[in-house]
Image (cartoon, rainbow, N blue to C red):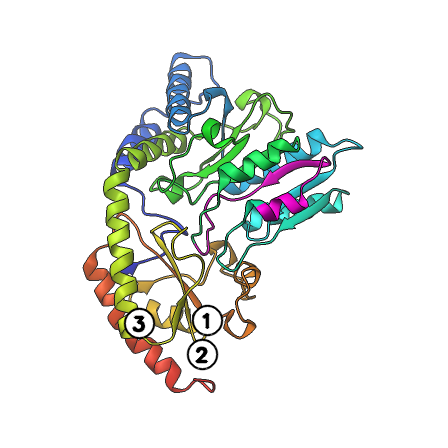
């Protein structure tokens, strides 16, 4: 049996999404920037996709900027807002200590340019509290960036409260919401977001397309220039198949939200209940309640997470030790370090993320194999 439990890294493309994309890969292939009839038809389809996405996230269509990935979108927003709004009186960027590497690295790059970078500490539940932000923010702050849902441990931030604090001190607020669809009902206006980031392949859409939602009233400097697409905010030939796929996938995600949440919650609960019965000394990383139902980051005492991952993969079960972006980096997770995990257990963790195509039978098979794997690995662990 093949079991894919790494849906937080990427999801399988929904066949219905592929069906909507296929014409734009074959017969409707014109460049949306061309002025001939096929090109203008492609542009109209692009416009409709933009309007669909804007409606689903409660924003303005002109605020949707399509990108090649969420990583690009985060770089664009963090760097673009900082560089465009810097002044002698405003020079600080605040991000959380558990942000995705692309946000973290963007901030550190700005630090080399002379910006002051502050990190909001996470508490032991993996949450960024309003009180923690309140201690750091001041009138010199340009931008605050806190992810809506953490990619490694699945914890959910109180974005509305954090955005209010940012605005009360004259700062802008951005949230990387890549892991939030469809778990949170996104509404940029109600949530108080000036900037938002999404990525299609996290909600059963295609890879290679994401978006930055921007408040067009706020100055932002482009990251990619040259062709003038997206009103000059992001140059480059429009990825029409990908954009159509993103819009369709997002629409499906929210249309089927209730059934999806019910399914992944049932899978998660069955997995966690069975795991605790089958294997002693396992611990959930992050809050037990303020988390999305599709993510369980589990600490297995006394053994290496990589050893568990490799052994499970040989048995057809595919999981992760954390962020997929860190697959070639075996350093301990800074997210787990930030929430105070004991240094002896920083490398003993596995992330299981459930999705639309998983089944109860796959969960049962995974528990069976996990029990065998953990027992075998602990049998020759020097500290077990």
Q: Residue furthest left?
A: 361
- Residue 290 in percent (x, y) is at 41, 50
The crowd level at tag 3 (other Cα within 10 Å; few <14, some 14-19, many 20+) is many
Chain-order first, disc 1 or disc 3: 1
Q: Residue at x 37, y 49 (%)?
A: 292
In this rendering, is residue 265 above or below 140? below
Q: Secondary structure at mark 1?
A: loop
Q: Secondary structure at mark 2?
A: loop
Image quadrant holding the N terminus, namely: bottom left
The residues bearing labels 1 and 2 have C-alpha atoms spaced at a distance of 7 Å
Q: Residue at x 60, y 21 (%)?
A: 217
- Residue 343 location, quadrant: bottom right
Q: Are marks 1 and 2 in contact (CB under 8 Å)?
A: yes
In this rendering, is residue 176 above or below 48? below
In the drawing, does residue 60 fall left or right of residue 140? left
Toward the viewer: 228 or 334? 334
Q: Is residue 315 visible?
A: no
- Residue 228 in percent (x, y) is at 58, 22
In the drawing, does residue 358 fall left or right of residue 347? left
The residues bearing labels 3 and 2 have C-alpha atoms spaced at a distance of 15 Å
- Residue 358 counted in the magenta span: no
Q: Are marks 3 and 2 in contact (CB under 8 Å)?
A: no
Image quadrant holding the C terminus, namely: bottom left
Which residue was labeled with disc 1?
348
Residue 370, disc:
3
The residues bearing labels 1 and 3 have C-alpha atoms spaced at a distance of 14 Å
Chain-order first, disc 3 or disc 2: 2
Q: Is residue 24 visible?
A: yes
Which residue was labeled with disc 2?
302
Mark nearer the viewer, 3 or 2: 2
- Residue 59 in percent (x, y) is at 45, 24
In this rendering, is residue 249 above or below 30? below
């Amino acid at each position: 049996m093949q079991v894919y439990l790494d849906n937080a890294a990427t999801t399988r493309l929904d066949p219905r999404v592929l069906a909507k994309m296929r014409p734009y890969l074959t017969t409707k292939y014109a460049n949306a920037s061309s002025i001939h009839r096929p090109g203008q038809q492609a542009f109209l389809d692009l416009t409709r996709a933009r309007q669909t996405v804007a409606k689903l996230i409660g924003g303005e269509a002109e605020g949707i900027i399509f990108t090649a990935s969420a990583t690009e979108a985060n770089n664009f927003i963090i760097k673009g807002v900082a560089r465009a709004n810097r002044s002698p009186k405003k020079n600080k960027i605040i991000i959380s200590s558990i942000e995705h590497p692309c946000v973290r690295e963007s901030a550190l790059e700005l630090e080399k340019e002379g910006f002051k970078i502050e990190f909001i500490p996470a508490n032991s539940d993996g949450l960024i509290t309003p009180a923690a932000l309140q201690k750091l923010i001041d009138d010199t702050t340009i931008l605050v960036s806190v992810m809506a849902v953490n990619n490694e441990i699945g914890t959910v931030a109180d974005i509305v409260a954090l955005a209010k604090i940012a605005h009360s001190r004259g700062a802008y607020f951005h949230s990387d919401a890549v892991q939030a669809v469809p778990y949170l009902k996104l509404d940029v206006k109600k949530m108080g977001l000036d900037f938002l980031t999404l990525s299609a392949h996290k909600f059963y859409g295609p890879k290679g397309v994401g978006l930055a939602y921007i408040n067009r009233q706020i100055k932002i400097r482009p990251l990619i220039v040259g062709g003038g697409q997206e009103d000059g905010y992001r140059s480059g030939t429009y990825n029409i198949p990908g954009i159509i796929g993103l819009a369709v996938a997002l629409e499906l995600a929210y249309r089927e939200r209730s059934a999806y949440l019910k399914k992944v919650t049932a899978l998660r609960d069955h997995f966690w209940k069975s795991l605790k019965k089958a294997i002693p000394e396992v611990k959930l990383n992050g809050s037990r309640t303020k988390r999305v139902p599709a993510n369980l980051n589990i600490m297995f005492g006394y053994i290496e997470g990589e050893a568990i991952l490799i052994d499970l993969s040989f048995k057809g079960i595919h999981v992760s030790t954390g962020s997929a972006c860190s697959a070639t980096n075996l350093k301990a997770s800074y997210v787990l370090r930030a929430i105070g995990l004991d240094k002896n257990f920083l490398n003993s963790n596995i992330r299981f993320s459930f999705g639309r195509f998983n089944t109860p039978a796959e969960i049962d098979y995974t528990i069976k194999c996990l029990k065998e794997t953990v027992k075998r690995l602990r049998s020759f662990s020097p500290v077990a």
